[in-house]
Amino acid sequence: MSEQQSELGFAAPHDAPVPYLERIRTYYRTLGYGAPYRWAQYAEVPFTPLAKPLAESRVALITTAAPYRPDRGDQGPGAPYNAAAKFYKVYSGDAAGEPDLRISHVGIDRKHTTAEDIHTWFPLAQLKRLANAGRIGELAPRFHGAPTNRSQITTIEQDCPDILARVREDGSDMAVLVPN
């Protein structure tokens, strides 16, 4: 790296993003799917500004983490990918507690990261701190789980309306989506 690149704060050449999209395409080709996976991509994305200040807003948390089910095999922080731990219906949990959620069912980069720290992929405790500090109005009473079965049609036509209805039932003004 040149001195100028270093002064500008550039990362070293070997410090490159994980080629996630290409890895997923290769994975699906290896499984025998003909066409590569088509990521949802929209020409226009709707944006809705907050109707009131964040410090007065009720915030919902939406996650793709799965509730721990001991009958589904290893789901611990060092577990290999575990398709048996997947869930296929939207669920809701009590945001007042400390839920036992896991991410062994998602295709994370297990070579470069781990699932050790739940706070890095399920920021419930941080949202509680923000509410206590007055940065957000309050945390919604429930968090919601979005399935990761990768069907765009099911996600758009079934899961999204279900989650939206639950978020509205809770009187939330906004939601934080944390895909794992």
Image: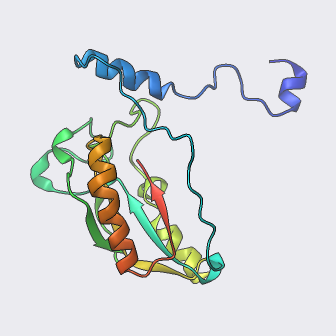
Q: Would residue 40 appear left or right of 98 to someone viewing this image? A: right
User: Residue 174: where, in percent of width, then height?
Assistant: 51, 70
Residue 94 x %, y %: 31, 76
The residue located at (89%, 22%) in the rendering is: 3
Where residue 19 sits: x, y (%)? 50, 24
Q: Residue at x 30, y 22 (%)?
A: 28
Residue depicted at 35% across the width and 80% down the height: 169
Q: Is residue 14 above or below residue 11?
A: above
> In the rendered image, which quarter is residue 52 located in?
bottom right
Vertical relation: 41 (above or below) 27: below
Q: Is residue 102 visible?
A: no
Q: Which residue is pictured at 21% across the width and 47% down the height? A: 86
- Give the total number of marks visible in the rendering: 0
Is 32 or 13 nearer to us in this picture?
32
- Which image quadrant for residue 50? bottom right
Q: Quadrant of residue 32?
A: top left
In the picture provided, is 124 more to the left or to the right than 47?
left
Q: Position of residue 144 (x, y in %)?
A: 34, 65
